[in-house]
Image (tube, helix red, strand yellow):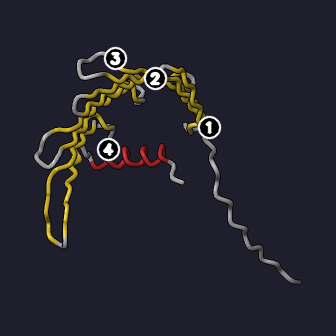
């Protein structure tokens, strides 16, 4: 199992060290060993701390099909994400307090009227590991509460061979 929080920290540290500010991904599509399509599929921009601040997704024609903007608090924790795809828009607003993260996700129609909202509360331990997530939302007019509990399983330590000394 991967520790995604640790992987994210390592990636940010590497981007900061290498001063990476832009990441461009190209898509190469081959059929029967021949290159059929070759285009930029996404561009991601990072701030000086290595945090993702902007991303765009493109189709084969170079048209923007998705866009996302990240905002952060001064302590480095994410405060807001705005995500646009075609005529849809999502916005996630989060707030952290006492090892708890409160988030509200709002989904908009194309005319910017609110379609749905959902709320979530995430609890973390002192090391930043996610312990529990509770989501509150409406599905087909019914209030639904979803609870996710995270279990961390450590790899068993290898038994050490002991050297016996004979006298």
- Relative to 95, 164 lies left or right: right
> What residue sits right under mark 1 in the picture?
149
Q: Secondary structure at mark 2?
A: strand
- Relative to 45, 61 lies left or right: left
**Cα–Cα span, label 3 and label 4:** 37 Å
> What residue sits right under mark 3 in the picture?
114
- Residue furthest to the front in view is 140
Query: Number of labelled discs?
Result: 4
Q: Crowdedness of circle 1 by 10 Å Cα count: few (<14), some, many (20+)? A: few
Q: Earlier in the sequence, mark 1 or mark 4?
A: 4
> What residue sits right under mark 4 in the picture?
16
What residue do we see at 19% from left, 60% from top? 28
- Select label 4 or label 2 by which is in front: 2
**Cα–Cα span, label 4 and label 2:** 34 Å
Q: Earlier in the sequence, mark 3 or mark 4?
A: 4
Q: Crowdedness of circle 2 by 10 Å Cα count: few (<14), some, many (20+)? A: some
Q: Is residue 21 above or below residue 94?
A: below
Instruction: Locate the C terminus and report the quarter of the image it occupies.
Output: bottom right
Q: Which mark is residue 118?
A: 2
Residue 99 seen: no
Q: Earlier in the sequence, mark 2 or mark 1?
A: 2
Q: Secondary structure at mark 3?
A: strand
Q: Is residue 137 above or below residue 131?
A: above
Q: Secondary structure at mark 1?
A: strand
């Amino acid at each position: 199992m991967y520790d995604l929080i640790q992987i994210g920290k390592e990636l940010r540290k590497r981007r900061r060290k290498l001063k990476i500010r832009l990441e461009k991904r190209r898509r190469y599509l081959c059929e029967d060993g021949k290159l059929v399509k070759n285009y930029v599929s996404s561009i991601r921009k990072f701030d000086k701390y290595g945090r993702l601040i902007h991303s765009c997704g493109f189709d084969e024609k170079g048209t923007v099909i998705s866009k996302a903007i990240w905002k952060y608090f001064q302590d480095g924790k994410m405060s807001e994400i705005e995500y646009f795809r075609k005529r849809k828009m999502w916005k996630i607003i989060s707030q952290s307090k006492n090892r708890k993260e409160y988030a509200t996700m709002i989904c908009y129609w194309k005319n910017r009227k609110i379609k749905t909202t959902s709320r979530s509360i995430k609890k973390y331990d002192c090391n930043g590991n996610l312990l529990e997530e509770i989501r509150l939302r409406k599905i087909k007019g019914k209030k639904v509460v979803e609870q996710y509990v995270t279990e961390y399983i450590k790899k068993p330590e290898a038994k050490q061979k002991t050297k016996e000394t004979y006298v």
